[in-house]
Amino acid sequence: MSMSIRSLLLAGLLSLLASCGGGSGGTTTAGIGGTGKIASGTITGFGSIFVNGVRYDIDNADITVDEDNINKSQADLHIGMVVTVVGTANATSGTATTVTYDSVVEGPVTGLTPSVDGLSQTFSVLGVSARIDQATVFDNNDPEFTFSSIADNDLVKLSGFFDTSNTLVVTYIRKTGVFDPFSPSGEAEIKGTVSNAPPGGAQPANGDTFDIGAITVTLTAGAQLDAALGGAVNDGDFVEVKGTLTSATSMDAILVEPEDPALGSDGDEVELEGIITNFSNSGGTIGFQIGNQPIDASNASLEPSGLTLSNDLRVEVEGSIDASGVLVAEKIEAAGNDSIEIDARVSAVDPTGMTIDFSVISGQPDVRVRANVETTFEDRTGGASQMNIGDVLVGDFLQVRGYLDPAGDLVAVEIRREAGGNLSLKGPVQAFATTSSITLLGVEFPTNSATTFTDINEDAVTAFDFYNALQIGDIVEMTDSDGDMIAEEVALEG
């Protein structure tokens, strides 16, 4: 029995809504050049915070949450939030000067629709299409608000990133109340491109209206316009609007501000996590976007080396901004849950279909891996000098390193045949039963009282503390070293 890994794709990142209502706002940052760095991605851990695999000390950072920086601290940040960090950093650690979080959209849930397999749900918030899945982090401010309990008219704040269909893949969601259609009220926030403003621009003194996507915004007499707007809101302006709901498709503005989509300026070093859109490869020039950030990937190194860039693939990009605002990538790697490792014995192989199945735990689904022309094979048993998938046999012990492609299939980048070894899985957490098991890649991997646990800093922790801090979507490696199909070691990797 084999299982698709389609449901594992996570989210995580700053993306911008298009004119149909989409966009998460950019953060304007002064050029920090040289030793400075701008990092944009999901928070994956604390102590201080982990973003894009780097631990940032935020003890002295200016923290802003939805444009409020009064007395904000680490306690106001949550796993799954997409943040922008400005500071200094090396490959593993850094010090943040600022940490900025801004919700993509805030408003009522409408049109909630579960997927056929029940593993995801889609809905709209103020015209923005959104999708939640088992990896979405639900804020614990309301313990009763969960994947199973979310309902139409829940007032929510969303963070995440947009895919090629302009659907927000939600990495973090917070419930703020319940919307009453018969007595509409509640806070609302939306970002996007203005349309249908009156000639000369919309002004509060006139009570004018304008649209962002399908949402009508009214400038009441008390609405404040940022000075940069010049006293009016005009068609084509890219703005953020905060206000109060008057219906599920309309709001009164309290504050309207221009949004600068620029992630940085000329010379800034950037680490950006997100989903590839508008991918192109023409004449050796490789380009794509993450949100509204254009990226030149023509000369970038890939990690793993066999990584195939394509639309809807989640990646981390490192490089610098050039004078035209393009992020010139130096390195691109599979991000977060796209870093998969399997050390196990082969249960089935299909050389024609280029697939290999692995039996991990008796009675659990097999894990299927797909090879392609870029997969590298190495035989460390001496059996084949130029190994390929045709040399793989049932019962072989293989070490596989790979990633999840946009279709949710596990693609092998490297496959090594070994004489034997410890059974091991590394991947995103799909589910867990406190102190007894963790599900990775469709396999429920048991733990017991003898299992040892380590946190993201590689420090030993108790089973209680490990499970208490564990989140769906965390990257975990589990190892069975004695063949009893129970994990002897469990390590949090991201």
Image: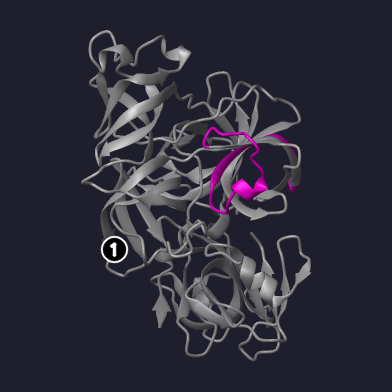
Residue 137 appears left or right of 224: right
Q: Which amino acid is tagged 1?
A: Pro
- Is residue 493 found left or right of 109 in the rendered image? right
**Residue with the mark numbered 1:** 114
Q: Nearer the viewer, residue 10 or 142?
A: 142
* Residue drawn at x 29%, y 34% as measured from the top left: 20
Rendered position, 421 above or below 201: below
- Residue at 69% over, 77% down: 463
**Residue reaching furthest left?**
182
Relative to 450, residue 76 above or below: above
- From what the image shows, is residue 149 above or below residue 91? below
**Image location (x, y in percent) of residue 316:** 57, 45
Residue 114 vertical placement versus 362 (above, below): above
The quadrant of the image that shows the C terminus is bottom right
Which percent across, then down, holds residue 367? 48, 76
Write down the region rendered in magenta.
Answer: 66-92
